[in-house]
Image (tube, helix red, strand yellow):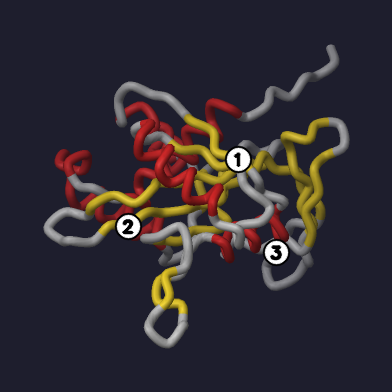
Amino acid sequence: MIPKPTAAVPRGDDDRLTVLSFDRGNDCKWSIETFFLRGSVCWPIMLPHTEKVQGALLLLGMHVLTRKVYVFEELQFSVVSNVLGSQGEVQYPGLAKPFAQWWTTYAAMAYWYHQPAVTAATYVRQVRHDGLIQPQPMFLELDWQEDYVPMSHVFELGSTGRLFLPDGGLCQQSILKQVTAGDNYQEIADPVRHALMVGVYGMVSKMPRQERAV
């Protein structure tokens, strides 16, 4: 089980890093730890053999000392703004609540993505126009040419015991589907897998270098 922090503040000497505080106990060995925290998003895509669109949103952190990567939060979504039913109830929840919760719990403001510019611009515009999403997050584009590049980092971290996913969660289910699909995994649209690829690739490629005195 990946513990949830009780407080989060940017580190004074480098605001790209976040200091998280934890309640020790219940198998939590952390007390005060420094992480490189970022979110990753796969904006909604059409799922195969269905008429549904679905996206995924993750929050990851790399421990600055161990270089282990943890997926702290994961969720699926289909709309940016709440869609209300005929009685005014929230029929399809948007992203205002998770963005606000992750800001409060982790001080998370930046989210990576890797999708066509038109797709990203469409959904980012919806975020900007949603008055319930406060504070407004930042979205940062990651670039790669072939999906095997970020996927190789996912497998490398996983095989060396440096990638930790919520037990029985969306990311674990996605990895299991990928293993089952074998060589055909790239042909299966999976927003969770895509968001995990984005997040892990960002952790590995964008982690601030720690300078050491010699």
Judging by the rendered image, the residue that carries numbered circle 1 is 138
In primary-sequence order, the first of circles 3 and 2 is 3
Q: CA distance from mark 3 to mark 2?
A: 33 Å
- How much space separates mark 3 and mark 1, taking CA atoms? 31 Å
Which amino acid does the dot numbered 2 rest on? Answer: Gln
* Mark 1: amino acid: Met
Q: Tell me which residue sits at (38%, 31%) in the image.
A: 117
Q: Quadrant of the N terminus?
A: bottom right
Question: Which mark identifies residue 54?
Answer: 2
Q: Residue furthest right?
A: 12
Secondary structure at numbered mark 1:
strand
Mark closer to the chain start, 3 or 1: 3
Q: Amino acid at mark 3?
A: Cys
Residue 28: mark = 3
Q: Are marks 1 and 2 in contact (CB under 8 Å)?
A: no
Residue 152 visible, this orientation: no
Q: Is 143 on the left-hand or right-hand side of 190?
A: right
Tell me if 138 is positioned left or right of 30 in this view: left
The Cα–Cα distance between marks 1 and 2, rounded to whole angstroms, is 21 Å
